Amino acid sequence: MTVSKHRFMVFKHCLKCGIILQGIMHDLSKFSPEEFFAGVKFYQGNRSPNEGEREALGYSRAWMHHKGRNKHHFEYWTDYNPKTKLLEPVKMPVKYVAEMFCDRVAASKIYMKKNYTDKAPLDYFLNAKKRRIIHSETAALLEELLTMLAEQGEDAVFSYIKELVKKNK
């Protein structure tokens, strides 16, 4: 039920951003056996089941499966740099940053329930800023959107994202 509620909320947010197909397709891999059964086994209700799986196994098989199939996760966007031969973050296309924004806001709402505020997704993002391996331009755009949400609210940020997505097609 948590996954379905989350997907529906992401879908509603994606509609407001003009990325309807992404909203429909969002997180369908969570219904694959690799992700679904881990989600059931490690469900806690107040955080991602992936955290429970990490604690039990030392890593999350479900997360590794998920991030490799869903382009709205910045972890998907890493590759070996042909010059340095090191794994490095790649700049995400705007439409996937928009979906990532919708995903983060929906996850905050689902997990925080009545304690959610429009500042909560920004706080969560900033809390992990030093540990995150994400392209600097992608991080800057996401932080800008989350800050806009915190300061101006959903209507303003969704309208801005819709125009941004149109401009970057």
Image (cartoon, grey):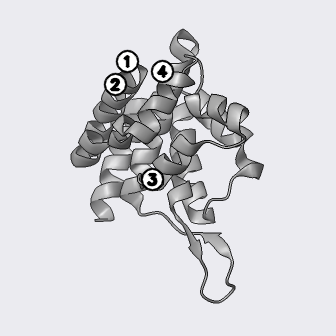
* Residue 35 position within the rendered picture, expressed as x and y whole percent measured from the top left: 45, 38
* Spatial separation of the CA atoms under disc 3 and disc 4: 20 Å
Mark linked to residue 110 = 4
Q: CA distance from mark 4 to mark 2?
A: 11 Å
The part of the image, by quadrant, that contains residue 123 is top right
Contact (Cβ within 8 Å) of mark 3 with mark 1: no
Q: Earlier in the sequence, mark 3 or mark 4?
A: 3
Q: Is residue 145 above or below residue 156?
A: below
Q: CA distance from mark 2 to mark 1?
A: 5 Å
Asked whether the residues under the numbered discs 2 and 1 touch, taking CB atoms below 8 Å apart as contact, a structural biologist would say: yes
User: Which residue matches tag 1?
Assistant: 1
Say which label, 4 or 2, has the lower sequence index: 2
Q: Which residue bears the numbered disc 2?
A: 4
User: Is residue 1 placed above or below 122 in the rendered structure?
Assistant: above
Q: Foreground mark, 4 or 2?
A: 2
Please name the residue that numbered disc 3 is placed on.
97
Q: Amino acid at mark 4?
A: Ile
